[in-house]
Image: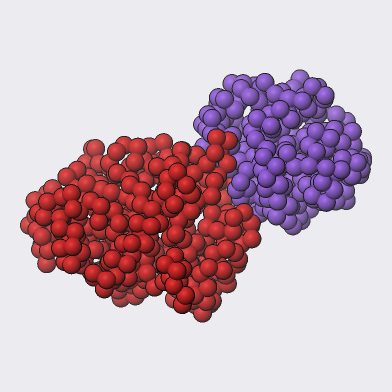
Amino acid sequence: MTDASTLPNSLRSGPATQANSLRQQPDSRGHFGPFGGRYVAETLMPLILDLERHYRAARADPAFKAEFDELLKNYVGRPSPLWLAQRLTEHLGGAKIYLKREDLNHTGAHKINNCIGQILLAKRMGKTKIIAETGAGQHGVATATVAALFGLPCTIFMGAVDVARQQPNVFRMKLLGAEVVAVESGAKTLKDAMNEALRHWVANVHDTFYIIGTVAGPHPYPQLVRDFQSVIGDEAREQILEAEGRLPDMLIAPVGGGSNAIGLFHPFLDDMDVEIVGVEAAGEGLDGKHAASLAGGKPGILHGNKTYLLQDADGQITEAHSISAGLDYPGIGPEHSWLHDIGRVRYEPVTDEEALASFQKLTKLEGIIPALESAHAIAAAERIAPTLGKDKIIIVNCSGRGDKDIFTVAEALGVAL
Amino acid sequence: MTRFATAFAKPHRALVAFITGGDGDTAANLDALVAGGADVIELGMPFTDPMADGPAIQAANLRSLAKGTTTADIFAIAAAFRQRHPDTPLVLMGYANPMTIRGGDWFAAECGRAGVDGVICVDLPAEEDGELGPALRAAGVDLIRLATPTTDTARLPAVLDGAGGFLYYVSVAGITGQQQAAQASIDEAVARLKAATDLPVAVGFGVRTAEQAAQIARVADGVVVGSAFVDIIARHGDAAAPHVEAFTRTLADAIHSAKEIAA
């Protein structure tokens, strides 16, 4: 492996200490530019402040990092490979495409990285119960997994509609010993699961730790989830330097709340020669039902932070839609809103139909069944790669595996299983 | 004197009554609250995601939105209430997004125009005061802050800084309309709060009966009842007003006749 110390400074992902670094957000009050913050009920405020203190101490503690790294290596199976997708590259006839294989992690997606970090924090804070929200069930499974590993009781809040359409994951969580609460309020999907998790938390703050699944929620969640997921970008950086001797020209990742994307992007934010593309779920199209908060929303306040939201003129939240349950959320992490506004990251929409086509294409060309979330990023790569020369390099985050999605895809293709 | 000061200067403790705007016949229900003896009215602004509320008020929010209630409708209800009841303090209670979507200045100006005396914004802690606090105070509208069982002595001054109208003590760590706190813990908390502020202290969350209300009124300046009213409106729909008035009278009698004890 290339010794990082022999590389020019510009290629090393050192600590973000430059004066104009884009990697120093958020500020002490949890703001990424005008986004982020701590918009929670007073009951939660002291707990949020306590979490922030504990996180700051943990970040500075080598023992915390050592335990985190050890679990990622021997339990999660990191580092995840960086795979040169040769057949996809040849098929598209343009830039060279590498896949960051988060789908090969234990539990099948990037979600576990964050869950490991947060359960270590919970332990550090002396909390004895774990709760989480989940949409498709991936974060719920990852949370139930770490709760089993640490022997802590765990309750997962999941919209009743999602419970019905994601039975295999519901059963997995139960096998792992978690209690799954089917949430009957609102549209009975991810947003409502998060409301219900917050309601439970506010009544159980003394002993309960809430493992939020994405880079959203009140400060310090967007920061700490990003930090735990940044292992993706740190590894990818080292791996591409080893494989190609240089940084990539472009990064592409799917964005729902945006935790896999920020994990890949963050270590590269100060490398201005690396173009960065986030992919939002355009569902049935931006003039129909979709989940593209940046393309079709405006700034507002929900679930503890200020960020782009799908909403009406009165600030009522509107329902999101995506074929990918993991992207089916009417908001986006506040750091993404900021990166969008300052123009550092370009966000592009991809529809259900495009994602379905890419899901099948990657499966046939590379023998990799991607999660529908990841298929959105593949679709964007298919659009962009042919417009770039063969000397260009793109890293696409294959954020999860698609086994969980085969029923959805079969139904969309009119196949009875 | 402000309407709040007048209401809390009465020779008895205050009943603070909450209903969700646009759920049922809101104008008739507001009149029933005043006729039954409520001293302060809280009008809930419906929101799609009321994450601090229990099932009763969640359902009321969704019923109201399903009928098409808008922010303009809420201000129209408030302005009409002010015409009919010049002296009863009126509070808008809700969530940050509907209150800030057009900017804090816009919201504060609309409150001023409609004759709203105070605002409770559930998910706007002191740390994020800038969204709404300066605009409301400039418009002469009180920002009513919440204190909770988790608000410790070190934090209390931050909560009180910029607070107006009255201090709302959320007596249980939880959501609206669920279990009630032990009376002893309420007594202790109210004493602690009153030592730290001259604002009147009203106690709410989980108060559903006249007996509970009377107990709390022995130590607190006001007692907040919400979910129990919302349940009546859920049960009786557009014909809820007489039932609302009868229940208000029961609560008001209990609270108004409560004898103060040294907290």
Chain identifier, colour red = A
Question: What shade does chain B have?
Answer: purple
Residue sitting at x 78%, y 42%: B24
Residue lying furthest bottom: A175
Q: Is residue A395 above or below residue B141?
A: below
Q: Is residue B228 visible?
A: no
Residue sitting at x 70%, y 42%: B67
Report the side of A46 relative to A385 (left or right): right
Q: Say which of A361 and B33 sits in front.
A: A361
Q: Is residue B133 above or below residue A165?
A: above
User: Residue A22 appears at what percent x and percent y?
Assistant: 27, 42
Locate the N terminus of chain B and report the quarter of the image it occupies.
top right
Q: Quadrant of residue B74?
A: top right
Locate the C terminus of chain B and report the quarter of the image it occupies.
top right
The color scheme shown is by chain
Report the side of A82 relative to B233 (left or right): left
Residue sitting at x 73%, y 52%: B56
Residue lying furthest front: A414
Q: Quadrant of residue B72?
A: top right
User: Residue B100 appears at what percent x and percent y?
Assistant: 55, 33
Report the side of A24 relative to B109 (left or right): left
Residue sitting at x 33%, y 47%: A348
Q: Is residue B163 visible?
A: yes
Q: Say which of A19 and B122 sits in front.
A: B122
Q: Say which of A389 and B53 sits in front.
A: A389
User: Residue A380 appears at what percent x and percent y?
Assistant: 29, 53
